[in-house]
Amino acid sequence: MENIELIKHLSNAAGVSGFEDDVIAVARNYLGDEAVVQEDRVRNLFIRSGTPGKDLPCVMLDAHSDEVGFMIQSINTSGTMKFLPLGGWNAQTVSAQAVRIKNSNGLWVKGVVASKPSHFMGPGEAKAPMDISNLVIDVGASSGQEVMEKFHIRIGAPVVPDVAFHHDPENGLMFGKAFDDRLGCAGVLEVLKHHISDIQHLNVTGVLSSQEELGLRGVSVAAREAAPDVAIVLEGTPADDTFNSSDFIQAGMKRGPQIRHMDRSVLCNPRFVRFAIEVAREHDIPFQEAVRSGGGNNASVITLHDRGIPTITLGVPVRYIHSHHCIAAVEDYENTVEWCVKILNQLTPDIIEGF
Ligand SMILES: [Zn+2]
């Protein structure tokens, strides 16, 4: 249950791109005082293991700490606010949702994305496609002045989905926001806290990288600091089993973690991918292979870093990623962590050399 508690705190933490502070606080609290952690200027968090100076292969274990959200763009005289998306949103899922806005006192203000009642709609208006630029956030203020003076909200304020984590132990399910990529963050933290004592043959640097949703920004800084020989990216990957035909399910819930051969941003090192698959087979860990025409993840940046870093991406299938409400299975999360640990256990300098 400790892992569910961790996931709950990470999921509930508010951390849109550039404002990952609360996620970092949850991570620091979980790791405790004895952990060797360090933070850079773009809010990347590094968790060090191993013996500094010892000539061991260095593995970067990455997950991004940010989540998709919004930023207040302007305040209308009516008291509503225009906003811009931080990360990829489908506008149809945004209207009528609850949000929280961080005000200039550091407090979170409840709001909703305003939706026009059908009573006020003209013919055909209800069926017209939505655009985020036409939506506004309402905190219940009566004027723009009130927004600024009473609610202390300024332009540039970060906005997060307002959703509380829920665990269904009976069915092994989790509901909540930001499973992309707080499930990956939980995995990185769990490995670094509980499994690292078995992995003395490697220097592992856990990284909670920032601003992934804005175009893989934090990781390009983080890869320089971590300077890895190989890397594993843990992700919350979009589940496809409620959309795709049974012939084309590559991220079904409760079918195991996903390993990506490629997506739009990266072709993962094929020898590292094959090694990871052999490890999963050896330990009877269920897994799914994916070849994606879309998507993108931090592996693309790490793969092309320095002289080229062999990198793989393991993903927990998450239904309805990049919306307010995600669903994921506890077993998929636990199998991802187990797979990651087994890969780390079996990585040797010779194997890394062969990548
Ligand atoms: Zn992600």
Image: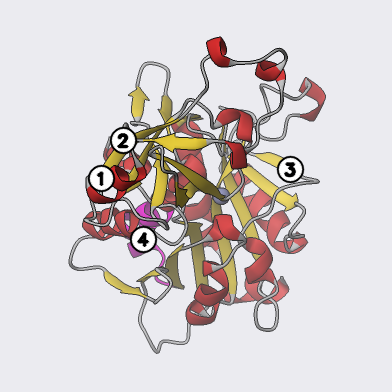
Give the position of the N terminus as an image quadrant.
Answer: top left
Secondary-structure class at tag 2: loop
Location of residue 214 by image quarter: bottom right
Instruction: Tell me whether circle 1 and circle 2 mark residues in contact (CB < 8 Å).
Output: yes
- Who comes first in sequence, dot 4 or dot 2? 2
**Left-right relation of 158 to 116:** left
Residue beneath disc 1: 151
Residue at point 61% right, 42% down?
A: 133
Residue beneath disc 2: 141
Question: What amino acid is labelled 2 in the image?
Answer: Ala
- Who comes first in sequence, dot 1 or dot 2? 2
Q: Nearer the viewer, mark 3 or mark 2?
A: 2
Secondary-structure class at tag 4: helix
**Left-right relation of 81 to 5:** right
Give the magenta part as a residue range.
Answer: 188-201
Question: What amino acid is labelled 3 in the image?
Answer: Ala
Question: What amino acid is labelled 4 in the image?
Answer: Leu
Q: Nearer the viewer, mark 1 or mark 4?
A: 1
- Who comes first in sequence, dot 4 or dot 3? 4
Could you tell me residue 312's position as x and y percent? 64, 59
Q: Is residue 252 above or below residue 32?
A: above
Q: CA distance from mark 4 to mark 2?
A: 45 Å
Q: Residue furthest left?
A: 33
Instruction: Tell me whether circle 3 and circle 1 mark residues in contact (CB < 8 Å).
Output: no
Residue at point 30% right, 54% down?
A: 22
Q: Is residue 322 above or below residue 116?
A: below
Residue beneath disc 3: 290
Q: Which mark is residue 192?
A: 4
